[in-house]
Amino acid sequence: MATTIPIVLNTALYAVIGIVIFAIGFLVLDLLTPGKLWEEIGPKQNVAVAIFAGAFAIGLAIIVGAAIHG
């Protein structure tokens, strides 16, 4: 039971680091693509951009997860 607290804290720390890396990745994606990513997805309802952003999110999540898992 005593080892549970450090495990939970490490898991929370890795989750926060993963989320930050994920957010930075999306910021970089938005800067590298022409136009504003969220304007294309939201008001303009551009399905192709939404699929591209979703594929990027899945790919980035797999990379971050593999890096954290070891």
Image: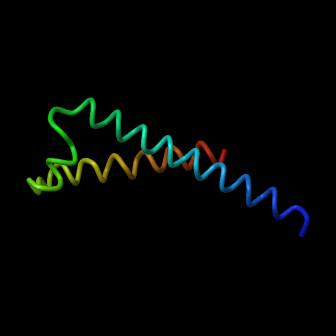
Instruction: Give the farthest residue toward the left.
Output: 44
Q: Quadrant of the N terminus?
A: bottom right
Q: Residue at x 42, y 44 (%)?
A: 23
Q: Position of residue 16 (x, y in %)?
A: 58, 49
Q: Residue at x 53, y 45 (%)?
A: 64
Vertical side of 58 occupied by 35: above or below: above
Measuring from the top left, give residue 13's x and y in whole percent. Answer: 66, 49
Determine whether, in the image, residue 14 is placed left or right of residue 57: right
Residue lying at 31% horizontally and 50% vertically, measured from the top left = 55
Which quadrant of the view contains residue 31? top left
Residue at far right of view: 2
Q: Residue at x 62, y 46 (%)?
A: 68
| Image quadrant containing the C terminus | top right
Q: Is residue 30 left or right of residue 16?
A: left
Q: Which residue is farthest bottom?
A: 1
Q: Position of residue 4 (x, y in %)?
A: 83, 64
Q: Is residue 33 above or below residue 23?
A: above
How many marks the image carries: the answer is 0
Q: Identify whether 48 is placed above or below 33.
A: below
Quadrant of res 33? top left
Q: Is residue 64 left or right of residue 58?
A: right
Q: Position of residue 35 (x, y in %)?
A: 15, 36
The foreground one among 64 and 45 is 45
Q: Is residue 57 left or right of residue 68?
A: left
Instruction: Specify the color scheme.
Output: rainbow
Question: Observer-nearest residue: 39 or 29?
Answer: 39
